[in-house]
């Protein structure tokens, strides 16, 4: 086979082995990656910044000792900063600020030997579950260009699915690793809170809800990378016990007989597409065939849970504006951002410290109740999303709702939050596409989307697996077992056929 063919079919682990065996040089591999990127980017539109000259220089340096030495990689334009790469987070408020030093996560990526060839597109301030920033333009799904990549790690997921790179950086504050993994047919693991570093630029991030890792095509790539980047950084607000054995060892070990719950019922009552129900039901059947104890069950969440999450989210948006203003030294202006983004800022600024404190306490009390459920079950299976990837623009407000958002953003509506029914309606709209993911950011539990189902018209549908806090080893071992029993890596999106 040619190197170009190997590049499409091999995961990052296999490519790293080619490099170690000197069957290919880092320069050759980076050149192939750049060629692939340039071929598919006009259709995907998933890139924010290109760092091709820096990548070629890095490829000419002596090969590192890291597990992915010489493997090309893309950095999501959110949360983790790379020295010399302008930062946008999908918005004008950052004004292309250029970080003076790498964040700890990026330092660990580089120590693992990864070569960054650019940064990828996100929705404005990474707030939406679809990657359609007005400022930079939408990213397209390689499985169907008229469909969303998901968000907020949409650009990264599009290019991994299209084989531009074998894996890419991703972050998750409410589902932003798992949502695009589902939409693009990838494996996406959100680690436990505190498992990977957020500093030094970010102290906590969305009240502890955000965490970084990657989207990958194989489970073993996710495990190897997690071994390379795991561990708290200096001054981290959270600590978590190191795994008893490397995560990659879990991939090679059967999980044993697990107690698995499954549910296709959205905890907020949202309608769930039949394809998403089918995906999780088929996964449950497969688990039974593999010898696991499987039954239909799910933890219960209070009716107000998503309203509470929305309050914490809105406070985090106002925090993001303040952070950008602090870093850039320039005040954000309404004309620089989308109406819905500015409205979120105003709602967040209207919160009192007491309101936020009470809300976070309610969320954390619920976390303790949910933890009891996982005393009975090792894993919970749900659909990752309530529908297959939607068409572009489908989740944006329209008509009267859009007009009211514009008006509210202009007038200022901080006291809107005191009207519980209005807040509940807003939460219902916000989470109807993604009702299965945000709660695990609050509980801090590891959760992953597995690409186990495709619709008749070729759209990927993910199945979410959730484990106890700190139990990535169980989750990775289980995911690897399903990957072997029901492989997905052979599936190629149509955008590749068009390039053949």
Image: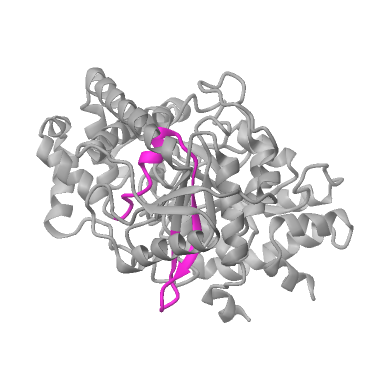
Color encoding of the figure:
one colour
State which region is magenta.
Answer: 433-462
Residue closer to the observer: 453 or 406: 453
Residue closer to the observer: 13 or 497: 13
Question: Which quarter of the image is occupied by the N terminus?
Answer: bottom right
Indicate the quadrant where residue 146 lies: bottom left
Question: Which quarter of the image is occupied by the C terminus?
Answer: bottom right
Q: Is residue 215 visible?
A: no
Q: Position of residue 78 (x, y in %)?
A: 49, 42
On screen, residue 70 above or below 352: below
Residue at x-position 77% and y-position 61%: 29
Indicate the quadrant where residue 486 lies: bottom right
On screen, residue 217 above or below 339: below
Q: Is residue 470 left or right of residue 305?
A: right
Q: Is residue 392 visible?
A: yes
Q: Position of residue 145 (x, y in %)?
A: 44, 71
Q: Is residue 455 left or right of residue 350?
A: right
Q: Position of residue 194 (x, y in %)?
A: 53, 29
Residue at x-position 52% and y-position 63%: 289
Count of numbered marks = 0
Q: In the rendered structure, does residue 84 fall within the stretch colored magenta?
A: no
Q: In the rendered structure, does residue 435 fall within the stretch colored magenta?
A: yes
Residue at x-position 39% and y-position 63%: 281
On screen, residue 89 above or below 389: above
Indicate the quadrant where residue 140 lies: bottom left
Q: Is residue 49 left or right of residue 354?
A: right
């Amino acid at each position: 086979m040619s190197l170009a063919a190997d590049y499409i079919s091999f995961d990052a682990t296999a490519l790293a082995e080619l490099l170690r065996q000197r069957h290919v040089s880092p320069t050759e591999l980076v050149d192939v990656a750049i060629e692939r990127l340039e071929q598919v980017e006009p259709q995907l539109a998933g890139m924010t910044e290109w760092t091709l000259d820096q990548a070629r220089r890095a490829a000419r340096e002596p090969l590192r000792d890291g597990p992915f030495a010489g493997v090309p990689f893309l950095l999501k334009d959110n949360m983790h900063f790379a020295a010399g790469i302008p930062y946008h987070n999908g918005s004008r408020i950052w004004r292309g600020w250029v970080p003076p030093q790498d964040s700890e996560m990026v330092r660990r990526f580089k120590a693992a030997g990864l070569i960054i060839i650019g940064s990828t597109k996100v929705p404005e301030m990474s707030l939406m579950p679809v990657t359609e920033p007005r400022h930079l333009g939408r990213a397209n799904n390689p499985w169907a260009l008229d469909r969303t990549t998901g968000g907020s790690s949409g650009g990264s997921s599009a290019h991994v699915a299209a084989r531009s790179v074998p894996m890419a950086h991703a972050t998750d504050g409410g589902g932003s690793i798992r949502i695009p993994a589902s939409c693009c047919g990838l494996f996406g693991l959100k680690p436990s809170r505190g498992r990977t570093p957020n500093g030094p630029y970010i102290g906590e991030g969305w009240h502890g809800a955000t965490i970084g890792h990657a989207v990958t095509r194989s489970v073993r790539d996710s495990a190897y990378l997690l071994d390379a980047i795991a561990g708290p950084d200096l001054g981290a607000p959270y600590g978590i016990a190191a795994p008893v054995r490397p995560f990659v060892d879990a991939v090679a070990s059967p999980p044993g007989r697990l107690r698995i719950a499954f549910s296709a019922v959205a905890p907020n009552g949202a309608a769930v597409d039949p394809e998403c129900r089918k995906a999780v039901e088929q996964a449950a059947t497969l688990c039974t065939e593999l010898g696991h104890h499987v039954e239909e069950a799910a933890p219960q969440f209070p009716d107000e849970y998503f309203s509470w999450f929305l309050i914490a989210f809105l406070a985090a948006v106002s925090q993001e504006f303040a952070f950008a203003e602090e870093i850039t030294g320039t005040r954000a202006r309404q004309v620089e951002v989308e109406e819905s983004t500015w409205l979120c800022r105003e709602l967040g600024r209207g919160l009192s410290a007491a309101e936020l404190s009470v809300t976070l306490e309610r969320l954390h009390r619920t976390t303790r109740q949910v933890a009891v459920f996982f005393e009975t079950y090792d894993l919970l299976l749900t659909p990752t999303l309530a529908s297959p990837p939607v068409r572009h623009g489908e989740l944006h407000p329209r008509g009267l709702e859009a007009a009211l958002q514009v008006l509210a953003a202009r007038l200022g509506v901080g006291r809107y939050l005191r009207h519980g029914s209005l807040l509940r309606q807003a939460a219902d709209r916000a989470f109807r596409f993604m009702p299965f993911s945000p709660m695990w950011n609050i509980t801090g539990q590891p959760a992953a989307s597995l690409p186990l189902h495709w619709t008749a018209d070729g759209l990927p549908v993910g199945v979410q697996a959730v484990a106890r806090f700190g139990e990535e080893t169980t989750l990775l071992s289980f995911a690897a077992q399903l990957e072997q029993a029901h492989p997905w890596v052979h599936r190629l999106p149509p955008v590749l056929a068009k390039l053949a």
